[in-house]
Image (cartoon, rainbow, N blue to C red):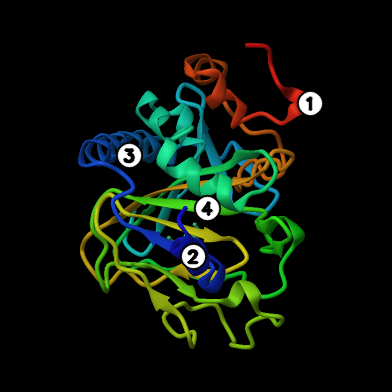
Amino acid sequence: MNTAETYEFDRMGYLLIPELLTASEVSRLAAAIDRLEELATRQLRRPVDKVSAWGPEYRYDKDYGYYVQGAREAGKTMIIEDFFNGDACFDMLVDHAPTMQYIRAIVQERPTINNSEIRIRYPGNQTKTHLGGPVASKYRYAYTGQGISCMMVRMIYFVHDVGPGQGEFCVVPATHKSNMPSPYAGSDPDKEPGMIGLPVKAGDAILFTENLRHGGLTNHSQQTRKTLHVGYGPYWMKSQNIATMDEEQHILPQTFARYAPEQRLLFRSWNTLLPG
Ligand SMILES: O=C(O)CCC(=O)C(=O)O
């Protein structure tokens, strides 16, 4: 993370990183997302397996190890959590060197992955605005004697272009430093003053602190928006996936077995660290 990027992240609470993924990574990840979308669509016809502590109902695919919520229909979102279990193609994102140089620059304690979701946003859909200003300590942004010191942050990877009107990820810049909650009624990102959409190209990524006010503008296009979201934080933070909120990370033994030691460390707090 260079000096200008560090300055911009501190000033704005997010960073748009062009071409973080190669064209070949993009095409492999996009194909894997499509495969899981098909599998998850079938799961969504089954009875509910788990109701999250936060409310949403999930189906669990015991063969592929992911949780899914939502619906595959206009106006809706499908969220597939723990996608790392679902396809070995996603292994490339675990200890992904270009990503980790950003994460290590802004999370001061040893970072681990605490969130993994494929977000599939069908035409007409939006993501409600959330966070910004005073937040729970696990999301907070700080600047200390060591520099930027974040709790939870997220990297969003884009596997196709998302232009204006196509459901851009959106932010109210600098609200990670705001001392007040947003005074604007409702959580419609299209209507919130100060909200800006961030158009991107395939291969780009957006890094942001969860302390920043953010959401997803309405997808007015006929293109379904598909993104990969990976959350990081200090090693002691538990899962921040909605299905397994504040539980241990849900990584299957066979997923773990594929990983190198550096990759395994990204899913383990010290006190549950497995040998090898
Ligand atoms: O991309 C979106 O639509 C919203 C994403 C979001 O809220 C998040 O990653 O926390």
The reply to whether the residue tagged 4 has its Cβ within 8 angstroms of ligand 1 is yes
The residue positioned 38% from the left and 27% from the top of the image is 87
Q: Earlier in the sequence, mark 4 or mark 1?
A: 4
CA distance separating discs 4 and 1: 24 Å
Whole-number angstrom distance, CA of label 2 to CA of label 1: 32 Å
Query: Which of these two is toward me, 32 or 144?
Result: 144
CA distance for labels 3 and 4: 18 Å
The single residue placed furthest to the right in the displayed view is: 271
The Cα atoms of the two marked residues, 1 and 3, are separated by 33 Å
First along the sequence among labels 2 and 4: 2
Indicate the position of residue 81 as horizontal and vertical percent values: 51, 41
Query: Can you tell which mark lies on residue 154?
Result: 4
First of labels 3, 4 by sequence position: 3
Q: Residue at x 55, y 24 (%)?
A: 262
Residue 89 to residue 31: above or below: above
In the image, 64: left or right of 165? right
Q: Is residue 45 visible?
A: no
Question: Of the residues tagged 1 and 3, which is closer to the observer?
Answer: 1
Characterize the local packing of mark 1: few (<14), some (14-19) or many (20 or more) Cα atoms within 10 angstroms.
Answer: few
Q: Secondary structure at mark 3?
A: helix
What residue do we see at 39% from left, 62% from top?
Answer: 16
Q: Nearer the viewer, mark 2 or mark 3?
A: 2
Query: Dots 2 and 3: beta carbons under 8 Å?
Result: no
Q: Residues within 10 Å of mark 3 (few under 14, many from 20)?
A: many
Q: Which residue is mark 1?
A: 271
SS for tag 1? helix
Structural crowding at the residue carrying mark 4, measured as other residues with C-alpha within 10 Å and reported as few (<14), some (14–19) or many (≥20):
many
Which picture quadrant has residue 253?
top right
Mark 2 — residue?
Answer: 14
Classify mark 2: helix, strand or loop.
strand
State if disc 4 and disc 3 touch (CB < 8 Å).
Answer: no
The quadrant of the rendering that contains the C terminus is top right
